[in-house]
Image (spheres, rainbow, N blue to C red):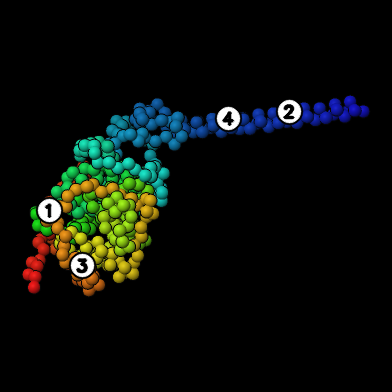
């Protein structure tokens, strides 16, 4: 009896194994014919030999094969001498750029001891087009960003700024252009007026909707400090090395900041009457708060900056009137700003890494004698 039951059990196990083998065989046959049909469909659409001659860099063996990314962005393949009759290339829609780009590095080592040239920076950034423009090739950025730098006699600083910022901005998937607003002559420097001019002039170049205003001697130490605009005006440079990597005071808005087009117009731009060093960034902070907005900032661990050390510029001495002007922002901001801006453009030159706009901004008003 026991032997009979054991024999029946072994028979059932053998049948089950045989059934599993049969099912496995059927599945393999289905997959084989499916792959075969796909290959047949590919070769029925076009002749693989002719296609490879026309596009020698296209690899049919790669899934979703694409043209190689090492080709310069401005290069194009020569058209085929043979007419294409049945082949119509389809352009896939570009996906939106991610909120947090995957290629970010995080904390960066920033140093200014090695020699720097514009030729070196240009070789390091072959994807940057004439005028200092860049558009991500694999995704569509949500904003078009203009980076505006007030400038005079800072060639040494500009080389380091371009060396570090171009790679950072490209990793951040920013659609951007870099504009140097160069004050002509040797009269007193006016940072805020140059920023107003930058806002006005870049809109003649393209429809920018985000404006980053940056000093040329400040380099971010973390590429997670994303250079685009936010729901509120943005202060990026919140922890500079010269301040011990701390915010010097709650209302500080200097160094690097960003405003959308709507935010900029809401505060009537920046003041034009701050000649010399200091005060204009506090006036801008007052304009923001007086118009019902708040300043947003990154985490202090991300908003760290290194400053290129230098002596104070000639004709940019501290403005003795700055404290009185800051106290009168509420009364002056409606008449002094983008609506009262006057200047003259002398030259616009597009270089490989940036666009230079040289302007004449006038002279400061004569100060009344003391007493």
Q: Which residue is mark 2?
A: 18
Name the N-terminal-most of marks 2 and 3: 2
Image coordinates of residue 256 in percent, x first then y, are 28, 54
- Counting residues from the start of the chain, the first of labels 4 and 1 encountered is 4
Query: Residue at point 58% right, 30% down?
Result: 32
Residue 356: in sight, yes or no?
Answer: no
Residue placed at 25% from the left, 53% from the top?
A: 214
Residue 242 can be seen, yes or no: yes
Q: Residue at x 29, y 36 (%)?
A: 72
Rendered position, 49 above or below 100: above
Q: Indicate which label's residue lies in the foreground, 2 or 4.
A: 2
Using a 10 Å C-alpha cutoff, classify the residue at mark 2 as few (fewer than 14 neighbours), some (14 to 19) or many (20 or more).
Answer: few
Q: Nearer the viewer, mark 2 or mark 3?
A: 3
- Mark 1, residue position: 314
Q: Calculate the distance from the C-alpha at mark 2 to the C-alpha at mark 4.
A: 21 Å
How far apart marks 4 and 3 lie (CA) works out to 81 Å
Along the viewing direction, whichever of 186 and 38 lies nearer the viewer:
186
Q: Marks 2 and 4: CB-CB under 8 Å? A: no
């Amino acid at each position: 009896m026991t032997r009979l039951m054991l024999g029946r059990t072994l028979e059932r196990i053998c049948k089950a194994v045989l059934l599993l083998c049969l099912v496995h065989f059927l599945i393999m046959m289905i997959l084989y014919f499916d792959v075969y049909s796909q290959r047949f469909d590919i070769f029925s659409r076009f002749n693989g030999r002719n296609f490879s001659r026309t596009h020698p860099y296209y690899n049919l063996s790669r899934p979703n094969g694409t043209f190689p990314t090492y080709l310069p962005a401005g290069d194009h393949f020569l058209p085929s001498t043979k007419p294409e009759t049945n082949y119509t290339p389809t352009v896939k829609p570009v996906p939106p750029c991610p909120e947090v780009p995957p290629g970010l590095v995080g904390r960066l080592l920033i140093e200014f001891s090695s020699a720097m040239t514009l030729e070196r920076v240009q070789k390091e950034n072959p994807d940057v087009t004439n005028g200092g423009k860049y558009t991500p090739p694999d995704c569509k950025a949500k904003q078009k960003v203009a980076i505006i730098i007030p400038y005079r006699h800072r060639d040494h600083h500009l080389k380091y700024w371009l060396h570090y910022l171009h790679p950072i901005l490209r990793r951040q998937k920013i659609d951007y252009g870099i504009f140097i607003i160069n004050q002509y002559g040797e009269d007193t420097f006016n940072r805020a007026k140059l920023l107003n001019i930058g806002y006005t002039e870049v809109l003649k170049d393209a429809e920018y909707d985000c404006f980053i205003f940056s000093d040329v001697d400040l380099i971010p130490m973390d590429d997670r400090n994303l250079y685009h605009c936010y729901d509120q005006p943005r202060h990026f440079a919140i922890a500079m090395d010269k301040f011990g990597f701390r915010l010097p005071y709650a209302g500080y808005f200097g160094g690097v900041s960003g405003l959308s087009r709507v935010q900029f117009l809401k505060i009537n731009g920046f003041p034009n009457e701050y000649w010399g060093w200091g005060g204009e960034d506090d006036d801008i902070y007052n304009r923001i708060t007086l118009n019902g907005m708040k300043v947003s900032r990154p985490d202090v661990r991300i908003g760290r900056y290194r400053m290129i050390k230098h002596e104070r510029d000639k004709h940019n001495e501290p403005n003795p009137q700055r404290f009185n002007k800051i106290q009168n922002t509420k009364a002056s901001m409606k008449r002094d700003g983008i609506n009262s801006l006057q200047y003259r453009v002398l030259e616009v030159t597009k270089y490989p890494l940036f666009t230079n706009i040289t302007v004449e901004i006038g002279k400061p008003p004569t100060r009344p004698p003391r007493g």
